[in-house]
Amino acid sequence: MLEREVKLRVNHSEFLRSLESLGLDYEIIGSDSQEDIYLDFDDCRLMLNDAALRIRVTGKGTLLTYKGPRSIVNGEKLREEIEGPLGSEECDSALRALGIPLKCSKELEEMMERLKDYGIAEKLRVRKVRRELRINGIDGKVYLDDVEGLGEFVEVEGGRSIDLVRKLNMTCRVVTPSYADLLHAIKH
Amino acid sequence: MLEREVKLRVNHSEFLRSLESLGLDYEIIGSDSQEDIYLDFDDCRLMLNDAALRIRVTGKGTLLTYKGPRSIVNGEKLREEIEGPLGSEECDSALRALGIPLKCSKELEEMMERLKDYGIAEKLRVRKVRRELRINGIDGKVYLDDVEGLGEFVEVEGGRSIDLVRKLNMTCRVVTPSYADLLHAIKH
């Protein structure tokens, strides 16, 4: 699947005020604490090739995700994404995209142990509270993220996400690095 | 010209100790305070297309630079770069790469005024102290950067910069966003 998203550096209150001033109705339809574990080989070769392997632990379950190299096109970030719950076939596919012929375990701890046999271990953790927003008349998903150590951001996923950003006059708020990129770069 | 660089998130003292432990002789051959003014159109369309227009004010003079979209290949950041002192032909070429048929002025203030007529204005300033290092037996330039608001980084430019990073066992310290990307993303 091709992931398509725009991340904005903006306080949530300001973002919601902008929606209101455009007359856009919205509703918060869910809230979740997410812990993202980024894994890599000893020499960080996934990062060096702009790819990523992530295990996301949420209240609803645990997902494994492979992300391919990014391209930035008109403010939108595009990258291949293969994702599935631990134990699923999609999870196996995500590992195959990395060249790892491994069966996904259903258990996080066992999964991490199996990856260790391939020289893959945790490199970075990103913790955030994510609220999902539904905006009437707008396709695509909108998330209000509060990221530990970084603060508030908004992510718009899918569809023509940059169109909403243009409508809100927020193109200068677009941020292209991932949360993991940012945390990795600022912690000394 | 194709710019080729690797940026590392590492304290300078640690980096220098690593050089010493590999038996690499080095010498600091210069130090400079740099103020980088990043400019863009009202809608930030350069940033949205992963390009940049920068005016760098240093003790040795003032340079204008156009940077094209990045690609990350094996940890190295590659991007087109056209650069020249204010008033030079290279400066005119950098503006032409942006589609701006403007003659560069020799004076910073006049230059900024002329750019304003095209809807281009300052968006962000990056201030740093940059020391240049010469490492015996190593091609390419090495800079120790102390960036206001971000801290210490090392940049290795030119040649096969990633080879030195591998030799130092620092591939996991590679950072791909620019200083401007990082400052833009973390200031709320």
Image (cartoon, coloured by chain):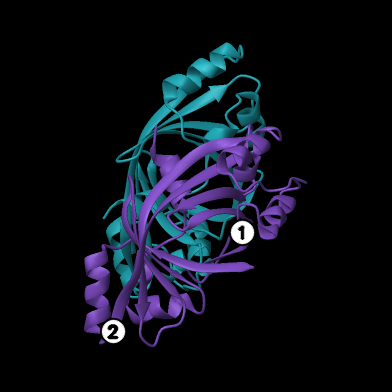
Chain colours: A cyan, B purple
Residue at 63% in and 28% down: A164
Residue toward you, B87 or A150:
B87
**In the figure, B167 relative to A166: above or below?**
below
Left or right of A78, for residue B170: left
Residue at 51% in and 74% down: B158
Residue toward you, B97 or B59:
B59
**N-terminal label among 2 and 1:** 2
Residue at 52% in and 46% down: A176
**The label number, if any, that marks residue B84 in the structure image:** 1
Residue B84: which quarter of the image?
bottom right
Could you tell me if the residues under marks 2 and 1 are in contact, i.e. CB atoms within 8 Å? no
| Viewport quadrant of the C terminus of chain A | bottom left
Q: Residue furthest front?
A: B106
Q: Residue A131 location in percent, x, y? A: 42, 29
Left or right of A121, for residue B73: right
Residue A157 in sight: no
Left or right of A90, for residue A150: left
Q: Amino acid at mark 2?
A: Asp
Q: Residue A135 location in percent, x, y? A: 57, 22
Classed neighbour count for the residue bearing mark 1: other residues with Cα under 10 Å, few (<14), some (14–19), many (≥20)? some
**In the figure, B150 relative to A167: above or below?**
below
The subunit letter for the residue under badge 1 reads B
**In the figure, B184 relative to B175: above or below?**
above
Residue A18: which quarter of the image?
top right
Residue toward you, A88 or B119:
B119
Q: Residue B97 location in percent, x, y? A: 72, 54
**Mark whose residue sits in front, 2 or 1:** 1
Residue B119: which quarter of the image?
top right
Q: Which residue is mark 2?
A: B25
